[in-house]
Amino acid sequence: MSVSLLRWVVKKTARRAMVAASVVSGSLGLRRLFGRVPVVRVLTYHRFGDAHRDPWCVDAASFEAQMRWLAERRLAVSLDDIERFVRGEQDLPHGAVLVTMDDGFSSVLHIAAPIMQRHGIASVAYVTTGFVGTVSASGERYLSWDEVARLPAAGVTVGSHAHTHRSMAQLPPSDAFDEAVRSRQLLEQHTGRPVRSFAYPFGMRPDESAATARMLSGAGYSTVFIAQHGALQRGADLARLPRVKVEGGDPMWLFKWLCRGGMDGWKLFDDTLWKLQKPALSEQR
Ligand SMILES: [Zn+2]
């Protein structure tokens, strides 16, 4: 779904200004902030393909260049690597990156997976099980169950993005629990693999809470991701792991800076301005 030209320009300018400010201020020297502790990041994508002025869709050529860059620097790691790193059981290089993709669009299997396989890059697809086999309001095809089942062999770990893509913290607790368990069971049934990772739909502050974190742990999830920005270090809270969103239209220089922490400062906006954000602004399908 493309956005208005004005909103596109405003959003793109804000992202570039944030990254430029990080570069200029030297706040990218996060090692200074964290001492010499290694810092890693988790990237969030949604769809892949040719879409005009659509921040949720990254074109294949850009994605190929991004994956090649990660592969050449040996920066890409798996979900297991990230979990063990946070638990203090494994070292990772400073600046290591995990690729994740939300919502379960068919372009994950048909466009992104072959590119990542060529570059030996592991990834996680967070699938909204109620969307499987359907088409989005903007005409984008979601994965079918047959396609979901093919993801592990294509090098893509499968995680849950709930069953109906509603805000978990806004649902009655029993409904949220049902979403968490039902989606996990469906994904395990169709992939034949254990599903232990969850990414919150929307994933902004109003969409998650201490109560939903406890509930997700009880529903069998050992790693849970939010959509708020930030880097990860050893000892991070596995129940609310921040990520960094990659948008369609991001030039290569911006992608490199995202991987180096250029959007980590956006955490301030996620933490302080979330009350001003309408859900539709935090994520759009
Ligand atoms: Zn989503």
Image: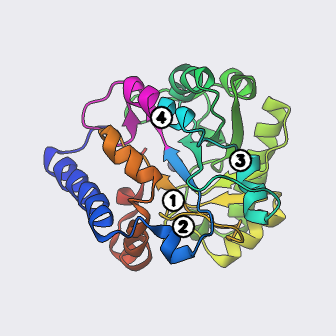
Residue 203 screen position, x and y as percent: 53, 61
Whether residue 259 is visible, yes or no, is: yes
Give the residue at mark 4: 69
- Figure check: 139 above or below 209: above
Determine the CA span between mark 4 and mark 3. 19 Å
Q: Earlier in the sequence, mark 3 or mark 2?
A: 3
- Write the residue at 44% across / 65% down: 264
- Figure check: 24 above or below 68: below
Q: Earlier in the sequence, mark 2 or mark 1?
A: 2
- Write the residue at 57% across / 61% down: 226
Q: Is mark 1 within 8 Å of ligand 1?
A: yes
The amino acid type, in three-letter code, at marker 3 is Leu
Whether residue 284 is visible, yes or no, is: no
- Quarter occupied by the C terminus: top left
Q: Residues within 10 Å of mark 3 (few under 14, many from 20)?
A: some
Give the residue at mark 2: 207
Q: Of helix, strand and loop, which one carries label 1?
A: loop
Magenta stretch, residue numbers: 45-66
Give the residue at mark 3: 79
Q: Earlier in the sequence, mark 2 or mark 4?
A: 4
The part of the image, by quadrant, that contains residue 11 is bottom left
Q: Of helix, strand and loop, which one carries label 2?
A: helix
- Write the residue at 31% across / 59% down: 19
Give the residue at mark 1: 227
Determine the CA span between mark 1 and mark 4. 24 Å
